[in-house]
Image (cartoon, rainbow, N blue to C red):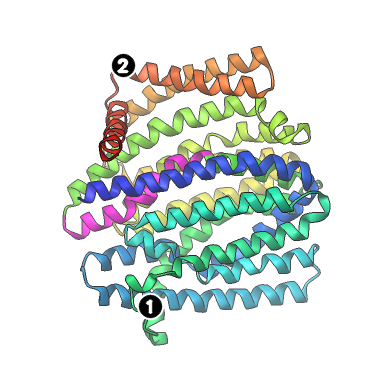
Amino acid sequence: MQRNKVSVNYIYNMLYQVLTFLTPIITAPILARTLGSTNLGIYDYTYTIVNWFTIIGMFGISIYGNREIAKATATNDKNVVSKKFSEIFTLQMINVTISFVIFILMILLTNFEYKNIFIIQGVLILSSAFEISWFYAGMQDFKKVSIRNMIIKLITVLGIVFFIHDANDLILYTVFMAVISVINSLVLFYKISDYVNYKKPTLKEAYSHLKGSISLFIPQIATTIYSVFGRTLIGMLYPDINEVAFYNYAYRFTTMVLYIVTAIGTVMLPRVVQIRSEGNETEAKNITNKTLKVALLLSLPLAIGFASVAPFFVPWFLTEEFTRVGTIICFLAPTIIFISITNVLGTQYLVPFEKTSQYTISIISGAFISLLFNFILIKPLGGVGAAITATITEFTVFLVQYCFVRKSFNFQGILRKFFKYLFSAGIMGAVVALIGFTLGVGIITNILQVIAGIMTYAIILYVTKDDIFKFLVDKLKELVFKKRTAN
């Protein structure tokens, strides 16, 4: 029963990730052609700064709330779940309100450029006060969150298609995205009473969760330093504001590809927490071990294939004005591999096994490296410097986490898988790049690259009888067969 629930959760989460993958295919070229790189640079720059206040307001609750609700759910007592939810949600509301007040004071008392855009973007901070995806994740109910996210994505696409027409629509675009953010947060409250009964807690009860959320907030703010700080510094240190848009597009495309792999960790976290709560640590470790191998199987071809396709994709997709995005992607693509690994080691092992101090050390190490190299590389290299820094940073996080968990897993077996998938993905990348250099920039080139890449990689794994590849194929067949039987 639990395995079926995990499979269903992963399917819903994967459907959302697929939509996340497809959405920029529609919106990115429209925004590139209507708003242009300068306006997108302004939007992205202001968004990154506002995002700092959103994360500060959430204070680590996204991960902490997920974990605590998963623990409460194991009791099968609605009152216990309701109490936990009420206390954590109240803490979130208070923290976000404080963060928003500080943001408004900063905007009003300083001479920031683009002040009107900043104020509109501030709505994003307020909307985060009502973001309760963590609750449904802890309940292992990804259906509602995924359906909500898919509907919001579709509304966003339609809004951009019908309302954003030229460079004068920057403010309209900013307002629209802010409104979407509010709707996105509020819609999950529909029928939440079926799960919990909110009872206003005392401040003492709400802030009893502060210590736990801080332990996860520290790595979260550190993560923000190396995932967002680069974009912020480009706007501050590099002379061309367009470079913010170029790097942000490269970052979004890379993240879009990365979602396919990281969906595994998001779905498995509450399951691992529950198994461990039942005292079965061996099974929890076995699940993590298998998930890590699946992450390697997917992330290596995605990273190498993406870097091989990008230079032949970006110029026609976003226009030649954005050609530099393809170059930045080539330097950013290796992060797909390292983030996929640390997503499993960190989110699926260190966090549910409450080794938060080790998780925190790994993230802080990455933040330190990010700060150092961003200040060194961004001014002379812009987005490329930020991409190189991101790769070095993610490798650092992986290295530190490996040092902590190396005795808990059979890394010899995992290492063998890594080199096998790297070799297979390398051959695939050579085939994909050859097609690109032969045919040049164009949509037909990209279609042939994707088909040839998937076939090359799959054939190699099939011929070598890879057990993880066979496991995934069997699971896919099982799901398809069940669907046909049901119909």
Residue nearest the observer in this picture, 394 or 193: 193
**129, above or below 419, in the image:** below
Q: Quadrant of residue 437?
A: top right
**176, above or below 466, in the image:** below
Residue carrying label 1: 86
Q: CA distance from mark 1 to mark 2?
A: 52 Å
Q: Residue 382: x, y in percent?
A: 72, 42
Instruction: Look at the numbered disc 1 and give the secondary structure of its residue.
Output: helix
Give the residue drawn at x 34%, y 39%.
292
Q: How many marks?
A: 2
**362, above or below 454, in the image:** below
Q: Is residue 266 magenta?
A: yes
Give the residue drawn at x 67%, y 58%.
47
State which mark lies toward you, 1 or 2. 1
Residue 389 visible within the image: no
Residue carrying label 2: 464
Whether tag 1 and tag 2 are in contact, CB under 8 A, the answer is no
Instruction: Look at the numbered disc 2 and give the secondary structure of its residue.
Output: loop
Residue 439 visible within the image: yes
Q: Residue 185: x, y in percent?
A: 52, 66
The residue range painted magenta reads: 257-279
Q: Quadrant of residue 179?
A: bottom right
First reached walking from the N terminus: tag 1 or tag 2: 1
Give the residue drawn at x 53%, y 15%.
431
